[in-house]
Image (tube, grey):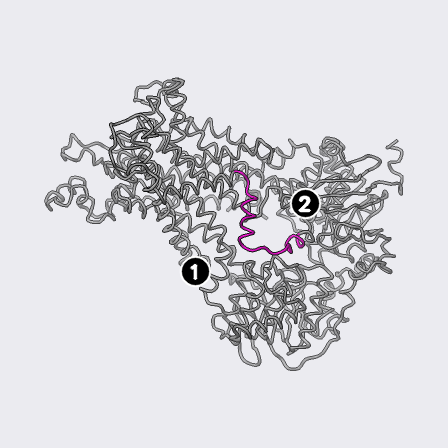
């Protein structure tokens, strides 16, 4: 019976009903998935989307009949190809894993065994399940490598995982998942750790191969624009519940639920650009290096006008974070000069006086590590007030409350420790700490990257409001073009330590582009299901 | 666990410090409660030894190797002193000496370690290399040799062990302080222009304190065992001062006659270190929040 | 040069420097003594002439640097100089050479250590692996409590309990392990059984805990989860995916515990009056026979350093990143 339904496209492959999953922590079981139904047809790609804590990965793995250690399925059923997976003995599940159902994990670098060559790991499922002989499986793997557009497909299998790049490894893992021509592949955030220009290539290869073999897939991600390229249908999850489910095109055009609508919001936020003439910070022909050998900053010139936002955008290794270290004096430039308010800024942190330090503040990517977990909000915000402005007692207390007000947190937060705050609240406290110094320039280093979409938008709005109120300048370091579009007046594009382009937002984001800017901008996934198809066509032309 | 549930958990209603301490102690597993009870009992005995002990440390109350009786529960030792009284005084001496040693060791190792982690300059390099070398000689062997050179006395014992043990404390303090010192909030403090003392005492120390407290327990049991071993070998605490290690050595021939006298002080040592280890084990699990599954 | 060779050579060089530094420390401990060694041996009342004669007879009148190099070059060839013990009369026939005293005892100690290692190492690795595989089971919990107790107990406590039951009550073994040069091999093993059992109990506890911890951290790596999700059996996951990455942690565990064994031997030898180098060192410390104490300390430290060095080298040569550079 099973073999008859086997290759009929459009027949049911996965049917999940009333699934509940719990996780064990602090001596108690907590619900992670709170009763979800899921339906997947053969050859269909389903996108699972949600923010952190939505339970999307847990649900995706449950479709394989797998629970992470410390989790359990407490109710419901998972049927795969007509067979119930919940309660199935480990022996039986094992015969399906790797052959009928396969998995592509987020971190390819950690998911490949460092001790074995790629080829052995890619062909392992096929040979282990006796689907192919070793030579057959190897020939097939080379074919898959070629289809996935890996360089040197004949020989790349002889390499060890640490010898190939992250994007290549992610494709090799897709080949591994594909080796037994499974009925279902679960992709768990496979491109999240990659740079945008690499992500495009990996997405294109993955989509092509899934289409070629007509494989059903569950694609888990937090990025709507990515899932729009990959999935036929999208399920939006939140707090372990289903929010909304629809075909990709319909969902993108007309989301029904308020929550889904808010996921779009940050893209609609856009600050009207203003040109600034009064230059607050000017970085001129700066070189910087860590060991003195490799230049991480190469002849960098950047100007930040007063009261304006300059976004520095680039991929990992572009030198954008090193630029921040050069400005703050943590990494004195080996060449060039940095001027602040028309005066040369001492290169080393130790040589700057307290008032100069006060004028330039910094906000970090991860508020978890940027706030001392052993200090209360009162002390975190109060310290710069005391240190720079000499405020004490009543005056300090009043100012702290004023700042909490400014960052839209109530005064009940004053005695909390950072671990009693949510991610967004922590980032607000970081902002208040910077603001307390009454600075002229704030360096924002990827301040929204670690946050969920909705929280990102709130933080960006707050930063804009504060700029209006205090006329502070922002140097906004980010890899995310959508964020750049939302908040910047001017944009600096960096690549391999060099400034590719600096100009007003309207100049940089509109043609004509320098080649790298073009590549970078075109690689950013758009909320359009045809974006990837069109891009590949355009690039092929 | 989801972020959401974490949020809810972390926003639990506030409790006072005493309330949460009582709660914490109640939630301790049996092994930790047992450990805490044992430690409390030892501390009590050590503090009030003169009141509790029926006789004094060196008083001869009967004939040698007197059998246990209602007056002398554990019998008499090789020159007729009361074993129970000597066990009680011995605990006071051994525990006291171990405690002083570990305090000195933490003062030296801890302050140098944190200083090295914060400055990370040539001083760090030199001290770290020196510690590597000193740590490549086993403590007991090194201590034996240094005691041979310096001669046997309680203060020599304390300073030699404190010096050797401080290398271990240095390494731990340096490594944990370094893992805190590279965090963004410490960089933020440096960018603010804070002085080193502020960074050390406000930013770093509060974050490494739990680790150091747990290590204090472990170092204490290690030093305590080393002192017991040295005394047992006859080069540690010297007679007539009562001490558990040398009491075992003095009465060791009795074991061949089937008497358990030598086992009493030995068991007293074992019980205390086991108790400390149980408590530290639980404390580490509580503070690190690490579990096997994750 | 291949990175593995380079790293191994670097590590060997570092080990050699450490050994050299340790030898300087051990040697100079004698020099640092306030008032000089002779003074402290002969007492405050000793006349300058006696002190001088004492120093001359032991060669202590020459500059320390010269003596250090003599000592080290001698030590490398197995010659540790003359013992102080026979130096009371300063007559030639009373002089005993340190290497002659140490030789047979070194053999005895390594005999005991080898006996322990042969039992303890495989047993601890297997038990540790089982505790890791069945973690949080009752087996794991009991093992955790028992090993914690054993680790926290002094060696002589474990030793006397064993003596009490196996030698005094059951009379299976003698309470003391008296051994001479002429003791036959099997007799030697029988006599060494109780000390070896004591050492086994002590190091097994350490080793098991360390094995358990490293296996657990290994098994929680994402590539092990991936191997499971590829449908491999538990056996295949362990043999093919966990084991090739386990050599370094296992080598570290073994080396650490053998090094620990070397130290534990001191107390155990004294308990059983087993004539090994540990007991010799304790005796020489009590009688302040410095050349013997120094020689013993150097041998202990060198064994310790070499064991850790071998663990590091195993970790280097099994590291795929170094074996197969980019």
Horizontal side of A211 relative to B257 (left or right) equals right
- Residue B160 visible in the picture: yes
Q: Position of residue A34 (x, y in %)?
A: 76, 47
**Residue behind mark 1:** B121
Tell me the magenta residue range: B6-30
Using a 10 Å C-alpha cutoff, classify the residue at mark 1 as few (fewer than 14 neighbours), some (14 to 19) or many (20 or more).
few
Indicate whether residue A324 is drawn in magenta: no
Using a 10 Å C-alpha cutoff, classify the residue at mark 2 as few (fewer than 14 neighbours), some (14 to 19) or many (20 or more).
many
Question: C291 or B190: which is nearer to us?
Answer: B190
Horizontal side of B27 relative to A507 (left or right) equals left
The chain that hosts pointer 1 is B
Above or below: residue B20 compared with residue C88: below
Task: Please report the residue visible at 81 percent of the width from the left and 55 percent of the height from the top.
Answer: A228
Q: Quadrant of the C terminus of chain A?
A: bottom right
Q: Position of residue C252 (x, y in %)?
A: 49, 39
Q: Position of residue B199 (x, y in %)?
A: 48, 63
Q: Quadrant of the N terminus of chain A?
A: top right
Horizontal side of A7 relative to B135 (left or right) equals right
Q: Which secondary structure type mostly characterizes the magenta part of the structure? A: helix
The chain that hosts pointer 2 is A
Cα distance in 3D space between marks 1 and 2: 44 Å
SS at mark 2 in the image: helix
Task: Please report the residue visible at 24 percent of the width from the left and 27 percent of the height from the top.
Answer: B63
- Residue A333 visible in the picture: no
Location of residue B10 (image quadrant): bottom right
Q: Residue furthest front?
A: B70
Location of residue B76 (image quadrant): top left
Above or below: residue A162 compared with residue C117: below
**Residue behind mark 2:** A156
Indicate whether residue B24 is drawn in magenta: yes
Select label 1 or label 2 by which is in front. Answer: 1
């Amino acid at each position: 019976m099973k073999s008859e339904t086997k290759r009929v496209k459009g027949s049911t492959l996965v049917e999940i009903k009333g699934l509940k999953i719990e996780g064990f922590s602090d001596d108690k079981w907590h619900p992670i998935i709170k009763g979800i139904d899921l339906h997947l047809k053969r050859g269909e790609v389903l996108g699972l989307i949600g923010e952190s804590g939505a339970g999307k990965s847990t649900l995706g793995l449950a479709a394989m009949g797998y629970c992470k250690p410390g989790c359990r399925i407490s109710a419901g059923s998972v049927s795969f190809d007509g067979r119930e997976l919940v309660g199935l003995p480990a022996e039986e599940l094992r015969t399906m894993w790797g052959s009928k159902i396969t998995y592509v994990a987020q971190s390819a670098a950690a998911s490949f065994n460092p001790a074995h060559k790629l080829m052995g790991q890619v062909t392992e499922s096929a040979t282990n399940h006796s689907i192919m002989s070793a030579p057959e499986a190897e020939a097939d793997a080379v074919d898959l490598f070629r289809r996935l557009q890996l360089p040197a497909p004949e020989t790349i299998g002889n390499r060890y995982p640490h010898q190939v790049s992250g994007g290549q490894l992610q494709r090799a893992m897709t080949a591994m998942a594909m080796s037994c021509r499974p009925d279902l592949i679960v992709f768990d955030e496979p491109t999240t750790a990659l740079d945008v220009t690499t992500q495009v290539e990996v997405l294109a290869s993955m989509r092509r191969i899934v289409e070629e073999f007509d494989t059903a897939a569950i694609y888990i991600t937090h990025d709507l624009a990515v899932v729009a390229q990959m999935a036929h249908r999208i399920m939006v999850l939140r707090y372990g519940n289903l929010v909304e489910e629809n075909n990709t095109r319909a969902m993108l055009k007309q989301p029904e639920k308020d929550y889904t609508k808010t996921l779009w919001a940050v893209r609609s936020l856009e600050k009207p650009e203003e040109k600034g003439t009064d230059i607050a910070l000017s970085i001129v022909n700066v070189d910087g290096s860590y060991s003195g050998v490799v230049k991480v900053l190469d002849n960098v010139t950047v100007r930040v006008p007063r009261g304006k936002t300059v976004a520095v955008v680039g991929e990992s290794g572009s030198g954008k974070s090193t630029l921040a270290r050069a400005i703050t004096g943590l990494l004195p430039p080996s060449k060039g000069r940095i001027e602040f308010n028309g005066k040369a800024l001492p290169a080393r942190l130790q040589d700057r006086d307290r008032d100069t330090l006060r004028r330039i503040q910094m906000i970090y990517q991860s508020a978890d590590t940027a706030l001392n977990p052993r200090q209360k909000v009162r002390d975190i915000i109060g310290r710069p007030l005391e240190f720079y402005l000499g405020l004490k007692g009543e005056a300090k207390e009043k100012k702290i409350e004023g700042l909490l007000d400014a960052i839209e947190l109530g005064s009940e937060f004053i005695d909390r420790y950072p671990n009693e705050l949510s991610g967004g609240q922590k980032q607000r406290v970081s902002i208040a700490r910077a603001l307390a110094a009454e600075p002229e320039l704030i360096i924002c280093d990827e301040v929204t990257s670690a946050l969920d979409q909705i929280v990102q938008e709130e933080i960006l709005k707050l930063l804009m409001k504060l700029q209006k109120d205090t006329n502070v300048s922002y140097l906004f370091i980010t890899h995310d073009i959508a964020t750049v579009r939302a908040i910047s007046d001017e944009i600096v594009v960096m690549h391999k330590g060099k400034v590719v382009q600096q100009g007003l937002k309207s100049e940089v984001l509109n043609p004509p582009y320098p080649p790298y800017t073009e590549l970078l901008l075109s690689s950013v996934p758009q909320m359009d299901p045809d974006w990837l198809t069109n891009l590949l066509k355009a690039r092929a032309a | 666990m989801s972020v959401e549930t974490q949020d809810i958990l972390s926003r639990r209603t506030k409790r006072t410090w005493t309330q949460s301490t009582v709660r914490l102690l109640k939630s301790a597993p049996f092994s930790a409660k047992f450990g805490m009870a044992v430690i409390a009992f030892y501390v009590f005995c050590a503090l009030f030894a003169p009141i509790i002990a029926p006789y004094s440390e060196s008083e001869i109350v009967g004939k040698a190797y007197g059998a246990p009786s209602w007056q002398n529960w554990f019998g008499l030792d090789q020159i007729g002193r009361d074993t129970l009284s000597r066990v009680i005084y011995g605990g006071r001496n051994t525990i006291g000496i171990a405690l002083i040693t570990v305090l000195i060791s933490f003062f030296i190792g801890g302050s140098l370690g944190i200083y090295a982690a914060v400055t990370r300059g040539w001083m760090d390099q030199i001290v770290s290399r020196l510690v590597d070398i000193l740590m490549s000689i086993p403590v007991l062997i090194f201590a034996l040799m240094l005691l041979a050179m310096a001669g046997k006395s309680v203060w020599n014992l304390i300073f030699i062990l404190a010096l050797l043990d401080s290398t271990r404390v240095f390494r731990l303090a340096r490594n944990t302080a370094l893992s805190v010192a590279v965090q963004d909030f410490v960089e933020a403090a440096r960018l603010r222009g804070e002085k080193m003392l502020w960074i050390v005492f406000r930013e770093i120390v509060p974050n490494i304190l739990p680790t150091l407290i747990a290590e204090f327990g472990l170092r204490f049991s290690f030093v305590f065992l080393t002192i017991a071993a040295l005394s047992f070998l006859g080069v540690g605490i010297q007679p007539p001062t009562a001490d558990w290690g040398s009491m075992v050595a003095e009465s060791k021939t009795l074991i061949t006659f089937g008497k358990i006298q030598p086992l009493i002080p030995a068991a007293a040592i074992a019980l205390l270190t086991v108790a400390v280890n149980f408590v530290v084990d639980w404390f580490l699990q509580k503070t690190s929040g690490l579990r096997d599954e994750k | 040069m291949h990175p593995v060779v380079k790293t191994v050579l670097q590590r060997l060089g570092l080990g050699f420097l450490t050994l050299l530094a340790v030898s300087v420390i051990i040697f100079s401990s004698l020099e640092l003594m306030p008032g000089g060694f002779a003074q402290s041996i002969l007492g405050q009342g000793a006349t300058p002439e006696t002190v001088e004669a004492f120093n001359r007879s032991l060669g202590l009148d020459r500059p320390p640097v010269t003596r250090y190099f003599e000592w080290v070059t001698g030590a490398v060839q197995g010659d540790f100089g003359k013992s102080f013990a026979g130096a009371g009369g300063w007559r030639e026939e009373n002089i005993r050479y340190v290497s002659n005293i140490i030789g047979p005892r070194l053999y005895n100690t390594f005999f005991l250590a080898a006996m322990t290692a042969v039992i303890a190492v495989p047993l601890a690795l297997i038990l540790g692996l089982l505790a890791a595989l069945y973690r949080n089971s009752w087996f794991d919990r009991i093992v955790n409590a028992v090993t914690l107790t054993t680790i926290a107990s002094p060696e002589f406590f474990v030793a006397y309990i064993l003596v009490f039951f196996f030698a005094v009550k059951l009379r299976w073994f003698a309470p003391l392990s008296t051994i001479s040069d002429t003791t036959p091999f099997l007799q030697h093993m029988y006599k060494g059984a109780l000390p070896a059992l004591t050492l086994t109990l002590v190091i097994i506890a350490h080793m098991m805990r360390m094995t358990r911890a490293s296996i657990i951290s290994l098994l929680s790596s994402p590539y092990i989860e991936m191997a499971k999700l590829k449908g491999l059996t538990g056996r295949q996951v362990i043999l093919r995916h966990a084991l090739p990455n386990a050599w370094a942690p296992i080598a570290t565990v073994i080396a650490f515990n053998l090094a620990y064994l070397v130290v534990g031997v001191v107390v155990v030898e004294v308990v059983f009056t087993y004539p090994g180098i540990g007991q010799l060192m304790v005796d020489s410390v009590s009688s302040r026979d410095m050349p013997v104490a120094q020689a013993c300390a150097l041998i202990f430290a060198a064994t310790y350093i070499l064991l850790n060095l071998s663990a590091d080298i195993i970790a280097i040569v099994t590291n795929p990143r170094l074996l197969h550079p980019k």
